[in-house]
Amino acid sequence: MARLFLAFAVALCALAAQAQGWPSKPVRLIVPYPPGGSTDVTARTLAERIAPALGQSVLVENRAGAGGNIGIEAAVKSDPDGYTVLVAPDFVASAPHVYKLNYDPMTQLVPVIQLTSQPVVLAVHPSLGVADLAGLVALAKQKPGLAYATSGAGSQQHIAAEWFAKLAGIQLTHVPYKGGGQAIADFLGGQVPIASLGSTPVIPHHKSGKVKILAQTTKKRAPSLPEVPTYEEAGMKGLVIDQWLGVFVPAGTDAQIVRRLNAEFDKALADPAVRERLAKAALEPVGGSTEAFAQLVRANFEMYRGLVADLKIRVN
């Protein structure tokens, strides 16, 4: 018994020493989507800001595929030493209800901080010739099966579009991509006439008149889209999704490291230059405690459990 206690004490001391010396090498931020989408934009903006504070390089690594699951699983299976950090959207909370996963994000990831919030937007290509959500509903009833692009199966964009289709009594065809950056290219080209995406890759093209955003999922109109009605304002009662991005680390990461990461990201989010860059990408900085973010993740996990079942969304 004494030997076991001694071994345990030595292990604790080693972990404490590791945490106190962290970081002693570059930190990587895993983004589970390709470059160009809101997750990638946020990660790169903040990596640049927190690197000097940490005294080490912070490298963004895009690990796209399987709707985001490849990158998330890579983070889950990394050593819990503080050198692998995941930047991911609320897909983390919905994925367990949609996919058969090889991991459990609710027990194998530790929430660190909420970074941003943004609406999911529904946009149309000019070739459809519709000016508002009512016009799209009317067209979809005449032409069932209109295609819409998302950043991936089981994403919040997918859930929002299927929720809209159910409330409107229409049938749409889902075309999933590996991320918002890839989806926007085909959408702009007219190959897919509708897009349900995070606001970041869509807003510049909406502002320039290349596409038109018809609705947004937040309870109130986002500051970056004051002219666009919410889904509820457009008659889709109850359709509210406040999409977020957050930071996670593998379970078992030392609490000191979690606190340091929370503090550095929180300070970065308060930086006026960072806030300006995020605002240009239609992202609202949030920040806050690890406890508040953990509560949000758990609440969203339960919310998506019901939504996914009700909408019959499932990916094998």
Image (cartoon, rainbow, N blue to C red):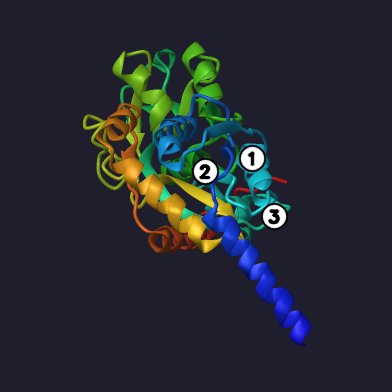
Q: Is residue 21 above or below residue 8?
A: above
Which residue sits at x=71%, y=82%?
5
Q: Which residue is mark 1?
A: 71
* Residue 98 left/right relative to 207: right
- Contact between marks 1 and 2 (CB within 8 A): the answer is yes
The residue at which mark 2 appears reads as: 88
Asked if residue 202 can be seen in this view, the reply is yes
Tell me where residue 120 appears, x and y as whole percent.
40, 38
Alpha carbon separation for disc pair 1 and 3 = 12 Å
Who comes first in sequence, dot 2 or dot 3?
2
- For residue 18, which quarter of the picture? bottom right
Image position of 83 with respect to 282: above or below: below
**Mark 1 to mark 2 CA distance (whole Å):** 9 Å
The crowd level at tag 1 (other Cα within 10 Å; few <14, some 14-19, many 20+) is many
Coordinates of residue 168 in the picture (x, y in percent): 42, 41
Q: How far across and down, in percent of the image, does residue 86 sit?
A: 55, 44
Q: Position of residue 193 (x, y in %)?
A: 49, 20
Location of the N terminus by quadrant is: bottom right
User: In front here: 274 or 177?
Assistant: 274
Q: Amino acid at mark 3?
A: Tyr
Name the outermost residue toward the bottom: 1
> Mark 3 highlights which residue?
103
- Report the amino acid beneath label 2: Ala
Between discs 1 and 3, the one toward the N terminus: 1
Q: Residues within 10 Å of mark 2 (few under 14, many from 20)?
A: many
Give the numbered dot on residue 261. none
